[in-house]
Image (cartoon, rainbow, N blue to C red):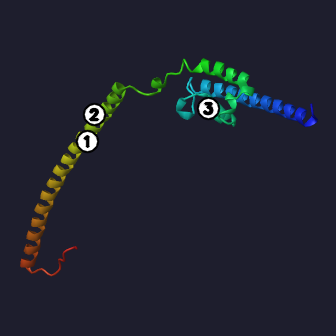
Amino acid sequence: MNNYKQAAIRNGSARTQLIFTKVKNMLDDMREEIQLNGGVYPYNGGKISKNEVCRRAGIGKTTIFSDKQRELNSHVDAWLDQFLPKKNYNSQRKSKTELAAQWKSKFLALSESHHVTELDLQALRSDYDKILEKNVALQCKLDALMESLKSQKVKIIFPIK
């Protein structure tokens, strides 16, 4: 065999090993992330797949499916089997009943807050009306006193403005 063919085989073998190492390291990282996130994969909407593994490892999607990477493909399949059966995508979502109960409680709290605010507004309007009546009564008294002062013709007293 020619030297360039042997070199190509060695380079190809080294590339295959490099890809295997990158993917294996990424699988270890993904396992840690899943454990730290309570058993849920924190990226890609919680979905784990071969394509996600390839994306995270920085290799092309089709690389893992090539004949040269058959061993790596089976390794990734075995790794995915550890997590996919346990993964329940619906468990991340709240059921319609839970969502309805949450919205109902929020609505009731908002409604109660509205009623309290409405009662506060009515109390303030009542206080405002009382103060306005008192102001009108005091203004009438002031006007009467001013007329009284004018009629007495006393020039020493000046009204304060």
The answer for how far apart the CA atoms under marks 3 and 2 are is 45 Å
The answer for how far apart the CA atoms under marks 1 and 3 are is 51 Å
Percent position of residue 125, x then y: 18, 51
Name the residue type under label 1. His
Percent position of residue 85, x then y: 54, 18
Disc on res. 114: 1
Which is in the foreground here, disc 1 or disc 3?
Answer: 3
Name the residue type under label 3. Asn
Which is in the foreground here, disc 3 or disc 2?
Answer: 3
- Relative to residue 35, is residue 121 drawn left or right? left
Disc on res. 51: 3
Determine whether the residue tagged by mark 3 lies in a helix, strand or loop.
helix
The quarter of the picture where residue 26 lies is top right
**Of residues 101 and 111, the one drawn nearer to the viewer in this rendering:** 101
Mark closer to the chain start, 1 or 2: 2
Percent position of residue 143, x then y: 10, 70
